[in-house]
Amino acid sequence: MEKLRFEFVMKAAADKKSNALMVTSITTPDGEIFDIPAELQEVSLHTELMKTDIYKK
């Protein structure tokens, strides 16, 4: 199975009063980078990613 690299960033949440964890891009093993559109960056939208052991750390 290929390993992908996810880039996480803390940004201001929609309410502008708190911070939210965002996934901003995905990098493949061969170096291709895929940017995530702003409206899909919030990590709460990526439930399968949140289930991984690495994310839980």
Image (tube, rainbow, N blue to C red):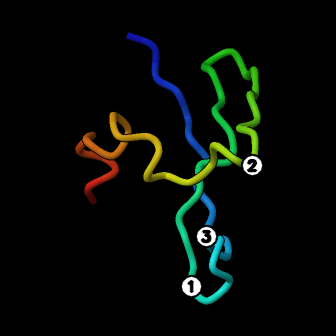
Count of numbered tags = 3
**What amino acid type is highlighted by mark number 2?**
Ala
The residue under label 1 is 18
Q: Residues within 10 Å of mark 3 (few under 14, many from 20)?
A: few
Nearest to viewer (mark 3 / mark 2): 2
Residue 47 found in image quarter: top left
Q: Residue furthest bottom?
A: 17
Kindly identify the residue that appears in the image at 46 percent across and 23 percent down: 3
Kindly identify the residue that appears in the image at 68 percent across and 40 percent down: 25
Question: Looking at the image, which is closer to me, 45 or 11?
Answer: 45
Kindly identify the residue that appears in the image at 52 percent across and 27 percent down: 4
| Residue 32, above or below 35 | above
In the picture, the quarter occupied by the C terminus is bottom left
Separation of residues labelled 2 and 1 (CA atoms)? 17 Å
Q: Secondary structure at mark 2?
A: helix
Describe residue 38's horizontal placement relative to residue 46 as left or right: right
Separation of residues labelled 3 and 2 (CA atoms)? 13 Å
Describe residue 34's horizontal placement relative to residue 28 as left or right: right
Nearest to viewer (mark 3 / mark 1): 1
Residue 30 found in image quarter: top right
Q: Secondary structure at mark 1?
A: loop
Q: Position of residue 8 (x, y in %)?
A: 58, 55
The residue under label 3 is 10
Mark positioned earlier in the residue sequence (2 or 1) = 1
**What amino acid type is highlighted by mark number 3?**
Met
Q: Position of residue 46 (x, y in %)?
A: 44, 40
Q: Secondary structure at mark 3?
A: strand
The residue under label 2 is 38
Separation of residues labelled 3 and 1 (CA atoms)? 10 Å
Kindly identify the residue that appears in the image at 53 percent across and 64 percent down: 21
| Residue 3, above or below 1 | below
